[in-house]
Amino acid sequence: MHMPGLLSSPSRDVKPVELAAVGEIMDDFGPETYLGIAFHRPDGGCNLWHAWTDGGDTLGDQVDVQALAATLDAADWLHIGDRHSTVTHRGRIRVEAYPLRPILADVQTGERSPDERRAGLRRVIDCAAARTGQTARPGLPRWLGFGPALLNRKGVNV
């Protein structure tokens, strides 16, 4: 039986479905958590969503302000994030959850990336620059961020 107004033609816009899934995923995590949610597409690409549970947006921005003031960089961001993250999968959806209180504590106590990891990241950057015919910048990129103010900035060179 056809019910006019209740059926629609197929759409290529996956955003409403992804947004609904993000909302459901957020319900599975406690407050003050940053979530990086990747929807893997059949074509090999993915759509990345940033989400914060209650209080996570404010706390994430606080973490970032303190990390940047302490001149933490991308190696520190990777190291500190790895210390506290959990990764789960829901079919083609990959969810990385970062509880922000322990991340803030690491930033405040001066946790830094081990030298070996820092050197490894430098080698990856140098290799990527060489393969693309670019000149690598000295040092490492800045702290990448856990809060919306830093993660949602457009057109910023890292």
Image (tube, rainbow, N blue to C red):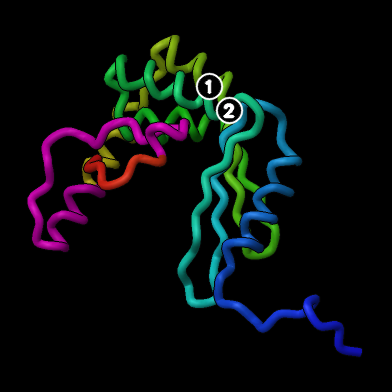
The residue segment tinted magenta is 124-151
Let me know if residue 129 is in the magenta part: yes
Q: CA distance from mark 2 to mark 1?
A: 5 Å
Which residue is disc 2 drawn over?
A: 56
Pick whichever, 148 or 79, lies toward us.
148
Secondary structure at numbered mark 1: helix
Q: Position of residue 72 (x, y in %)?
A: 31, 23
For the residue carrying disc 1, how many other residues have a C-alpha within 10 Å: few (<14), some (14-19), or many (20+)? many
Q: Position of residue 101 (x, y in %)?
A: 58, 19
The answer to which image quadrant residue 65 occupies is top left
Residue at left offset 32%, top offset 34%: 74
Amino acid type shown at disc 2: Gly
Work out whether residue 148 can be spotted.
yes
Residue at left offset 36%, top offset 36%: 144
Let me know if residue 57 is in the magenta part: no
The answer to which image quadrant residue 108 occupies is top left
Amino acid type shown at disc 1: Leu
Residue at left offset 60%, top offset 54%: 94
Q: Position of residue 63 (x, y in %)?
A: 45, 21
- Above or below: residue 48 compared with residue 96: below
Secondary structure at numbered mark 2: helix
What label does residue 36 carry, if any? Answer: none
For the residue carrying disc 2, how many other residues have a C-alpha within 10 Å: few (<14), some (14-19), or many (20+)? many
